[in-house]
Amino acid sequence: MPDTSNPEHIVEHAEAAIATLAKTKKAIGKVILGQDEVVDLALNALLCGGHALLVGAPGLAKTRLVETIATVTGLDEKRIQFTPDLMPADILGAEVLEESESGKRHFRFLPGPVFCQLLMADEINRASPRTQSALLQAMQEHQVTIAGVAHDLPKPFHVLATQNPIEQEGTYPLPEAQLDRFLFQIDISYPDETHEREILLATTGTEEAAPVTVLSAKDLLQMQALVRQMPVGAKTLDAIVKLVRLGRPDQTTLDKVKNGVSWGPGPRAGQALMLGVRARALLQGRLAPCVDDVCALAPPVLKHRMALSFAARADGLALPDLIASLVREIA
């Protein structure tokens, strides 16, 4: 664990982490082709100790990405396929009544799949709001309460959820409280022509690349502690504060936000940026973040923490364009 009292020790650990993360990205990149930015954002979320929502059309390797990350990082992974009939107990677990040989009855807690280090919530928006809310406490407090008893989750604990944006039938939009608990919303797009050729050649032959373990859960926890110890300069901090406040209708100086935004980013957006810019610097081989990191992470941090008004949408205003205009104000 880095010694916070000695900057030289922090630099030493940071340099070692940079080298290890380069190996980690390379191991994931051998399996997940043409999605370098998506891989960086997913690893960024893990380095921050947070959760990520992966949004993309079918067939873009969302599930394969999560499985590969679990293997490469050495995390215990479990998968839940979210469906309309899924119940909270199917995620959290439940107490069952048992009877001993002497005839004495007692309750025993059977933990659900949420008790893991990396939970893949596949097609999370297909479950009912009641079932979706079962993850709220787990994602924020890293524990669940069953029958009045709190049960701690393993460390580290991360949720990587997938969502299909084009199928609307049989889906339930995630509530704002749950969206806010995701550090990033990671949009996955189609690969370019060059990478699509590579994917076709790599996945239709007799053998496919298999992920190898590079990290362990202990290594990841140490890196998460290191991220929190990295310095953030005053200019970068000012950019973060300015960005989140510009996105709030009651605090902004921009008319398009005042008139077009129903609700803006809360304090969790600033926290996500403070952690995310440090992790991004580490992933890119730097020892301190800069304003460019804030600009790069603004879309994945803000796009699920802001909502346009009906009038703004009717006028053709798009949220990505609005976020881009906020970024120009701090660049």
Image (spheres, helix red, strand yellow):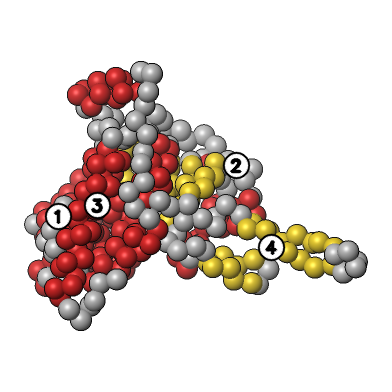
Task: Name the element at disc 1.
Answer: loop
* Mark positioned earlier in the residue sequence (3 or 2): 3
* Mark whose residue sits in front, 4 or 2: 4
In which quadrant of the rendered view does residue 193 lie?
A: top left
Mark 3–mark 2 Cα distance, whole angstroms, equals 38 Å
Residue designated by label 3: 21
Mark 2–mark 1 Cα distance, whole angstroms, equals 43 Å
Mark 3–mark 4 Cα distance, whole angstroms, equals 38 Å
Q: Name the residue type under label 1.
A: Gly
* Residue 224 location (% of width, % of height): 31, 64
Q: Residues within 10 Å of mark 4 (few under 14, many from 20)?
A: some
Q: Name the residue type under label 4.
A: Phe
Residue designated by label 4: 109
Q: Name the residue type under label 2.
A: Pro
Quadrant assignment for the N terminus: bottom left
59 or 241: nearer the viewer: 59
- Mark carried by residue 172: none
Residue designated by label 1: 285
Q: Is residue 328 left or right of residue 106?
A: left
Q: Is residue 127 left or right of residue 4?
A: right
